[in-house]
Image (cartoon, rainbow, N blue to C red):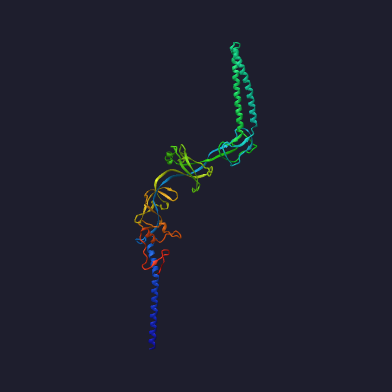
């Protein structure tokens, strides 16, 4: 009897323990089933290729950013590497011989045309001038005497008291003194010019370089080194070469007394230094390079262009009127060429091949064919797309305030008119974390 009671008690305990275990397992399964279902739904939506990959269920959408296809006037640019050259460079030399007594400029100074740069001792030329002036006075007195004599000879000849030969001789004497006076006047002018040449002035406006001769040295008109070099930097010129296939486009403007707008950039091509224009083109092609040389002029008021500086020159050779323009980030490259993802009216995308034109700044790109104004193209989220994929367009209102991250795809899809992601029945999921919590 006792053994039967003990066996019954053990069997009852086992049943109670088994029942408790079954209840605990059921509770655990019930508690974790919503999160597992949510994660499973997410995995099914993303598929093996991530969001929007090959494993995406039919009817689910991919959130993307979109840009509008518009029209605008797009300038056509021609770029070239150029060298800044001074518009004029003059080596200032002495035109007379003498000792350099004064230097009136500072190296690197900006000077104006006609400004005094140096002075040569003019005393020898002043003495020569005084001598010529004395000779002139003497010959003028002789001429006066000869003219009075000639007047008397004319009266005597009229009275038949003087021979014709004497009259003609006196006329010749007057002419001789007149010629001497003109020679004296020419010598005086030359002496005055030498005195002016002793004052060495700048022939152009610009900046002087290093002083080549110091005060106290003898300078000569035959010297080739000069005293200083003056470089004109306002305006400045940039010489560059372009391929010969661009000549027809350039000649249409330059041979009709027009100019082409030009912009000089630094060596990196990131900073614009000056705005100018091109008016000159060489009259022949360089056969060794197949290019033609051109020159652009820049006012260079702030002197940012320096002689012998290398610059990147951008030349506007034309304008595409009302060209189709897309956001630059929408353009994609492949082995087949350029393409974009075109958003259809049913919120599906199609891979569209396009022919690109010139860029419009850093943010827009001209398209010559393949698109029309009013179309919409994908700008972000491109790596998750395939032809026929359904997309939802994320707008500024659908961005997270915290970090500008896309909001829940379901909300965006509803706003765009697409279908929302289905949640697990009976449970709500948080869009931010994707984990389900019981309510």
Count of marks placed on residues: 0
350 displayed left or right of 173: left
* Residue 101 versus residue 404 in the image, above or below: above
Q: Quadrant of the C terminus?
A: bottom left
Across and down, in percent, residue 420 comes to 36, 62
* Residue that sits furthest to the bottom in the current view: 1
Specify whether residue 47 is in view. no
Specify whether residue 27 is in view. yes
Name the image quarter holding residue 164: top right
Q: Quadrant of the N terminus?
A: bottom left
Instruction: State the residue in front, 439 or 102.
Output: 439
Query: What residue appears at the point 38 percent right and 84 percent down from the top-left corner?
Result: 8
* Residue 152 versus residue 48 in the image, above or below: above
139 displayed left or right of 32: right
Across and down, in percent, residue 361 comes to 44, 49
Across and down, in percent, residue 163 comes to 60, 12
Query: What residue appears at the point 42 percent right and 49 percent down from the top-left corner?
Result: 365
378 displayed left or right of 230: left
* Residue 179 versus residue 313 in the image, above or below: above
* Residue that sits furthest to the top in the current view: 160
Across and down, in percent, residue 105 comes to 61, 39
Name the image quarter holding residue 194: top right
């Amino acid at each position: 009897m006792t053994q039967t009671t003990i066996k019954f008690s053990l069997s009852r305990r086992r049943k109670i323990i088994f029942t408790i275990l079954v209840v605990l397992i059921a509770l655990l399964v019930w508690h974790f089933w919503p999160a597992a279902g949510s994660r499973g739904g997410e995995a099914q939506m993303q598929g093996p290729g991530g969001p929007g990959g090959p494993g995406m269920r039919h009817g689910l959408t991919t959130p993307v950013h979109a840009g509008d296809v518009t029209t605008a006037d797009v300038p056509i640019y021609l770029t070239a590497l150029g060298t800044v050259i001074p518009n004029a460079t003059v080596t200032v030399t002495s035109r007379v011989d003498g000792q350099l007594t004064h230097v009136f400029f500072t190296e690197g100074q900006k000077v104006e045309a006609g400004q005094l740069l140096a002075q040569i001792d003019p005393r020898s030329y002043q003495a020569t001038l005084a001598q010529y002036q004395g000779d002139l006075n003497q010959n003028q007195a002789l001429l006066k005497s000869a003219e009075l004599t000639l007047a008397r000879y004319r009266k005597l000849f009229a009275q038949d008291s003087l021979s014709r030969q004497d009259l003609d001789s006196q006329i010749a004497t007057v002419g001789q003194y007149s010629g001497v006076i003109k020679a004296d006047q020419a010598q005086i002018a030359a002496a005055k010019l030498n005195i002016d040449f002793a004052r060495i002035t700048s022939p152009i406006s610009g900046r002087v370089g290093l002083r080549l001769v110091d005060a106290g040295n003898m300078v000569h008109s035959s010297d080739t080194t000069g005293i200083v070099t003056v470089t004109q930097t306002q305006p400045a010129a940039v010489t560059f070469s372009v391929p010969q296939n661009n000549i027809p486009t350039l000649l249409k403007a330059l041979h009709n007394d027009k100019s082409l707008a030009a912009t000089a950039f630094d060596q990196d091509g990131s900073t614009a230094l000056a705005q100018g224009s091109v008016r000159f083109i060489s009259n022949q092609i360089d056969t060794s390079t197949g290019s033609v040389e051109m020159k652009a002029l820049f006012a260079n008021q702030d002197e940012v262009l320096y002689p012998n500086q290398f610059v990147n020159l951008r030349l506007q050779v034309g304008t595409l009127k009302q060209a189709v323009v897309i956001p630059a980030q929408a353009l994609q490259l492949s082995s087949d060429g350029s393409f974009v993802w075109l958003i259809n009216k049913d919120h599906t995308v199609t891979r569209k091949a396009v022919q690109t034109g010139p860029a419009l700044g850093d943010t827009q790109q001209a398209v010559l064919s393949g698109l029309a104004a009013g179309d919409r193209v994908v700008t972000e989220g491109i790596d998750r797309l395939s032809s026929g994929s359904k997309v939802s367009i994320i707008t500024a209102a659908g961005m997270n305030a915290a970090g500008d991250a896309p909001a829940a795809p379901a909300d965006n899809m509803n706003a765009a008119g697409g279908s929302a992601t289905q949640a697990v029945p009976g449970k709500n999921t948080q869009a931010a974390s994707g984990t389900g919590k019981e309510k």
